[in-house]
């Protein structure tokens, strides 16, 4: 009977017991990047690990799903842990649909660490260019995300103007200060991150105005034909419509 008995045991301070520790409760990462979900776990030395798995919980009112059973994660997840204490998970080529709560679960012979406890919540964000007023009619363009990136220490930003890569020294920061009245600064701007070639923000137009390249004017000519005109003549007129500029006499 003992083999079928499952219990979730919280860790008691000063005792060697079952426990899972997530280094970060929440992580914000950029779409297309790689993220590690740091994790540590422990169990008594007299126990032997039977199996372990990572689960994803998209909604709190739904049961978590084993990551290994989801085809959209195939080839994108790697377990960096071991059978002793490390349970870190790596996810590559992040997608916005990866935003969810992730939980680690393991089992010994007669004890199981379930997923009722909170895990690590991952938020995947894309890039957006936001504009704010600056001094002396300048505008500040900022390459922003929907949440503060957890690991942004090594980020180098890339800026584009009208689709062309800007190589000025100031373009490696997350913001640009521009003059919309300057012909040199006018254009369509987008931003990205060095090393992530497939991640680019939508373009934002600065100082450009829409210009109408051509206008087509239609003229409707209404001809009143007296009822005394012969039917044959009317049919001939209708069968041969007037061209632009042609004179017509009744």
Image (cartoon, rainbow, N blue to C red):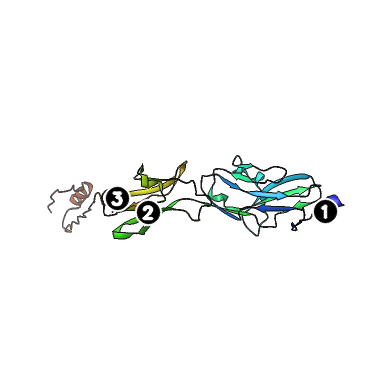
- Mark 3 is surrounded, within 10 Å at the Cα level, by few (under 14), some (14 to 19) or many (20 or more) other residues, namely some
| Residue shown at the point (62%, 48%) measured from the top left | 38
Cα–Cα span, label 3 and label 2: 12 Å
In the rendered structure, which disc, 1 or 2, sits on the residue that comes first in sequence?
A: 1
- Mark 2 is surrounded, within 10 Å at the Cα level, by few (under 14), some (14 to 19) or many (20 or more) other residues, namely many
Tell me if 132 is positioned left or right of 9 in this view.
left
Which residue is disc 1 drawn over? 5
Q: How many labels does the image show?
A: 3
Tell me if 109 is positioned left or right of 72 in this view.
right
Task: Give the image location of residue 225, x and y in percent.
Answer: 17, 57
Looking at this view, name the residue that lies furthest to the right: 1
| Residue shown at the point (41%, 49%) measured from the top left | 173
Disc 2 is placed on an element classified as: strand
For the C terminus, the image quarter is bottom left
Which residue is disc 2 drawn over? 141
| Residue shown at the point (29%, 59%) measured from the top left | 137
Which residue is disc 3 drawn over? 186
């Amino acid at each position: 009977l003992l083999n079928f008995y499952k219990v979730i045991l919280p860790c008691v301070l000063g005792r060697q017991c079952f426990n899972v520790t997530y280094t970060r409760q929440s992580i914000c990462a950029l779409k297309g990047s790689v993220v590690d979900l740091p994790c540590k776990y422990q169990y008594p030395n007299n126990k032997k690990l039977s199996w372990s798995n990572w689960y994803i919980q998209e909604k709190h009112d739904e049961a978590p799903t084993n990551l290994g059973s989801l085809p959209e994660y195939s080839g994108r997840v790697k377990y960096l842990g071991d059978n002793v204490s490390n349970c870190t998970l790596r996810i590559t080529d992040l997608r916005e649909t990866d935003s969810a709560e992730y939980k680690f679960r393991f089992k010994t012979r007669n004890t199981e660490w379930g997923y009722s406890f909170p895990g690590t919540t991952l938020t995947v964000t894309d890039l957006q260019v936001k504009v704010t007023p600056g001094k002396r009619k300048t505008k500040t363009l900022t390459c922003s995300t929907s949440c503060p990136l957890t690991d942004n220490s090594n980020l180098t930003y890339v800026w584009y103007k009208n689709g062309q890569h800007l190589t000025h020294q100031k373009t490696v920061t997350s913001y640009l200060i521009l003059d919309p009245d300057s012909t040199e600064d006018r254009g369509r701007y987008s931003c990205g991150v060095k090393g992530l070639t497939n991640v680019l923000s939508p373009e934002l137009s600065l100082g450009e105005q829409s210009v109408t390249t051509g206008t087509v004017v239609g003229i409707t000519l209404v001809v009143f034909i007296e009822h005394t005109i012969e039917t044959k003549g009317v049919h001939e007129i209708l069968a041969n419509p007037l061209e632009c500029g042609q004179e017509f006499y009744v």
